[in-house]
Image: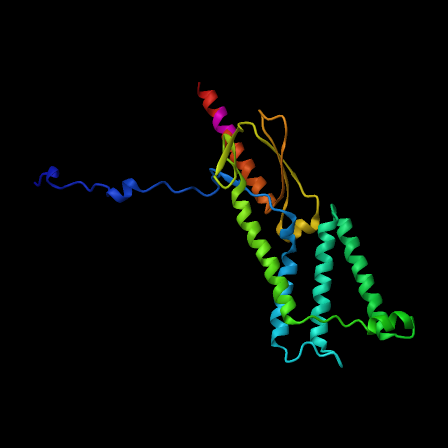
Amino acid sequence: MSDASSHPVAQPSKELLSAPAKKRPGEPPNHIFLVPYPKVVFLYPTLLMSFAAAVVLSLLENPMKIDPPDRVAVMISALFLGVVAVNLVILAFDFPRTTSLTLFFLVAAVVMGLILLFVYNPNLLPFLTGVLAAFHPLANPTFYWAFAGILGALFLAVMIAVRFDYWEVRPNELLHHHGFLANLERLSAPNLKIDKEISDVFEYFLLRSGRLILHGSDERRAIVLDNVPFIKQKEEAITRMLGALQVQVRAEGADQ
């Protein structure tokens, strides 16, 4: 009969013992970053359109031909002006409800329908038809490359600037990172309350953004963060994190 003690018992490897515990699915995050952006970020459709126009017009043989004008060049320029106009309307006005969004598209459809009606029926309003017939917007590729370069540089500057001014939500505190020297302001947030506002459906459509209002227990004034991208996901993550903290505190209090 063999002795059982003669067989070595398998020991767990050092790699297994030192491996960090993986985060379980559905577990609340340890911290959440909130980055408010300036409204200029909503001009990214204009940036994309200017870049696309620059590329297309650079491939044309003579995009500045006037007599007769190049139809592709005219169409690209008119489309660019339309995108810029819509983008500026989004920045200038708020569309807080779906009804205002529907009204906007209705007005745009009516205007486009009237333009097509006058173009294909020139005898209805000869003066207006003549104006539309003479409307041939043209710009060379250099203009669109320069426009895209200026707007792209502005976007790059914004992306750099927001890295020096953002907020971090943790289970028991609220941190404000700001300044080029990495200044840090700590606010106690055990009972943090948050309000979410989506004041513009267009801005939400473009970046899923909105306004977050943070109410700290020890702060008299509310902290308002405008144009926070993916606001619903941020709100849900903060709610899960703070909810898990409250459950843990209550459980510890019950044990005592």
Report the front residue among 190 and 35: 35
The outermost residue toward the top is: 256
Above or below residue 71? Residue 153 is: above
Magenta-tinted stretch: 246-250
Magenta region includes residue 249: yes
Looking at the picture, the colour scheme in use is: rainbow
Above or below residue 46? Residue 77 is: below
Give the residue drawn at x 14%, y 41%: 8
Report the front residue among 176 and 255: 176
Give the residue drawn at x 72%, y 71%: 138
Magenta region includes residue 65: no
Give the residue drawn at x 64%, y 62%: 147
In the image, 248: left or right of 229? left
In the image, 132: left or right of 198? right
Q: Which is the main secondary structure of the residues drawn in magenta?
A: helix
Q: Position of residue 96 (x, y in %)?
A: 73, 45
Q: Position of residue 69 (x, y in %)?
A: 74, 78
Q: Residue 106, located in which quarter of the rendered image?
A: bottom right
Q: For the N terminus, which image quadrant?
A: top left
Report the front residue among 164 and 43: 164
Q: Position of residue 128 (x, y in %)?
A: 88, 69
Q: For the C terminus, which image quadrant?
A: top left
Q: How many marks?
A: 0
Q: Residue 132, located in which quarter of the rendered image?
A: bottom right
Q: Position of residue 174 (x, y in %)?
A: 53, 33
Above or below residue 54? Residue 240 is: above
